[in-house]
Image (cartoon, helix red, strand yellow):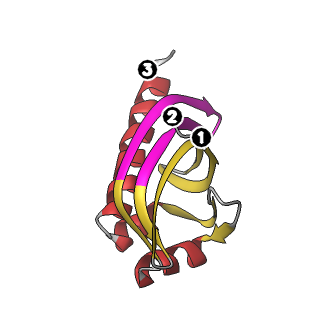
Amino acid sequence: MTDSERISESVIQDLEAKRYRAVLEQDFATFDDLCHDELVYSHSGGNRDSRQDYTAKLRTGTLRYHRIENSIESITIIGNTALVLGRMKADLTVNGTDKTINNSSLAVWIQEGDEWKFVAYQPTPLPNS
């Protein structure tokens, strides 16, 4: 692994932590700044949101995270794209209903110039253990 790959992985780890922290703390400006205009955010129920739809759900409280545990299992960087495989467990409220989720996840970041932007998220529900 080259020094630039290590640096990029470290940057991606920091951005993932910042993304989850922003959602949890309802720091919508920070979250929005991390996102690519073409963000596709998939949910564990199979539905997908655009950047605008997802951020609207966060801002209105339709979707509210109370606790998030995120662990990164691997980061693969190919050109200007970073694939982040991990796990995400969370307690949240969706449309007034409390839920707990336990997902395997794939987050995708792309580098544009000097900035990395969050462009896609795909969770897969894991069986309860």
Mark 3–mark 2 Cα distance, whole angstroms, equals 39 Å
Relative vertical location of residue 92 with respect to residue 88 in this rendering, above or below? below
Q: Is residue 89 magenta?
A: yes
Q: Tell me the amino acid under the disc marked 3.
A: Asp
Q: Which mark is residue 126?
A: 1
- Residue, x 36% and y 42% (percent of image)? 14
Image coordinates of residue 79 in percent, x first then y, are 65, 35
Q: Which residues, given as a range, are shown in magenta?
A: 68-90
Chain-order first, disc 3 or disc 2? 3
Relative vertical location of residue 33 with respect to residue 11 in this rendering, above or below? below
Q: Which mark is residue 129?
A: 2
Q: Residues within 10 Å of mark 3 (few under 14, many from 20)?
A: few
Image coordinates of residue 110 in percent, x first then y, are 59, 48
Q: Tell me the amino acid under the disc marked 2.
A: Ser
Q: Secondary structure at mark 2?
A: loop
The residue under label 3 is 3
Q: Tell me the amino acid under the disc marked 1.
A: Leu
Q: Residues within 10 Å of mark 2 (few under 14, many from 20)?
A: few
- Residue, x 50% and y 28% (percent of image)? 73
To which quarter of the image does residue 30 belong?
bottom left
- Residue, x 49% and y 17% (percent of image)? 2
Instruction: Check if mark 1's residue and mark 2's residue have beta carbons within 8 Å.
Output: yes
To which quarter of the image does residue 3 belong?
top left
Q: Nearer the viewer, mark 1 or mark 2?
A: 2
Our reading of the magenta stretch's main secondary structure is: strand
Image coordinates of residue 89 in percent, x first then y, are 44, 46
